[in-house]
Amino acid sequence: MRRRAEVDESRRAVSLPASVLSELYEHARVTAPEECCGLVVGTDRQPYRRAVRCRNVMTLMHSRAPEQWPWDNRRGFYMDPTDYQPWVKGESADGERVTAVYHSHVGAACYLSSVDLDLVDLSQFPHAEQIVISVGEEQLAAGIFHREGIGHPFVGHPVVVAAP
Ligand SMILES: [Zn+2]
């Protein structure tokens, strides 16, 4: 089993626009106690332009094949393919592409679990950064994970709100 990837607070913080971060937090908050998931899309100039919510169908996957998918929506996420399919082909007409995939952890910190790491490599967006939102009792937090390429380890960076 792979070791999970943690946020390294000593690393450079990555700035997300307030509109995007608040959308991720809102999605995580309304979906709790289940995990939310989705995409962040943007351009080279504006990599974190907007969030695209996807439905989490892990509970459905679990009900169909519990041995293959031992978790439900509270413990894992599986993005509904119909929600992300339009983005698989690459850039949209206006130059937007998937720059990050996000999901939430309810009552747990921002890290990529060993399961999260395995699923990234199976996903349609293995080159995207990964954002994890932690939904705590009192507050929400986010971390963003980047790797130099497939096969390299993910490094976790703290997330801050971009200056307007
Ligand atoms: Zn996770």
Image (cartoon, rainbow, N blue to C red):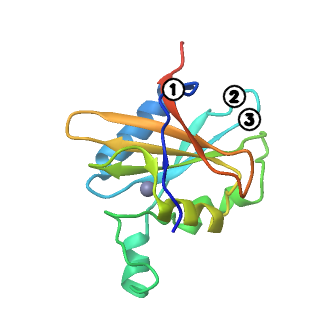
Amino acid carrying mark 2 in the image: Gln
Residue 63 position within the rendered picture, expressed as x and y whole percent measured from the top left: 36, 83
Q: Quadrant of ligand 1?
A: bottom left
Q: In the picture shown, does residue 2 fall above or below 111? A: below
Residue at left offset 64%, top offset 64%: 121
**Mark pair 2, 3: CA separation:** 5 Å
Identify the residue under disc 3.
43
Kind of residue at badge 1: Ser
Please name which of the two marks, 1 or 2, marks the residue nearer to the observer: 1
**Mark 2 C-beta closer than 8 Å to ligand 1:** no
Residue with the mark numbered 2: 46
Q: Are marks 2 and 3 in contact (CB under 8 Å)?
A: yes
Residue 95 at least partly seen: yes
Foreground residue among 156 and 140:
156
Q: Residues within 10 Å of mark 1 (few under 14, many from 20)?
A: few
Three-letter code, disc 3: Thr
Q: Secondary structure at mark 3?
A: loop
Q: Is residue 114 left or right of residue 12?
A: left
Q: Nearer the viewer, residue 117 or 99?
A: 117
Q: Nearer the viewer, residue 32 or 146?
A: 146
Q: CA distance from mark 1 to mark 3?
A: 27 Å
Instruction: Give the alpha-carbon distance from disc 1 to disc 2, as whole Å.
Output: 25 Å
- Mark 1 or mark 2: name the one nearer the start of the chain: 1
* Disc marking residue 10: 1
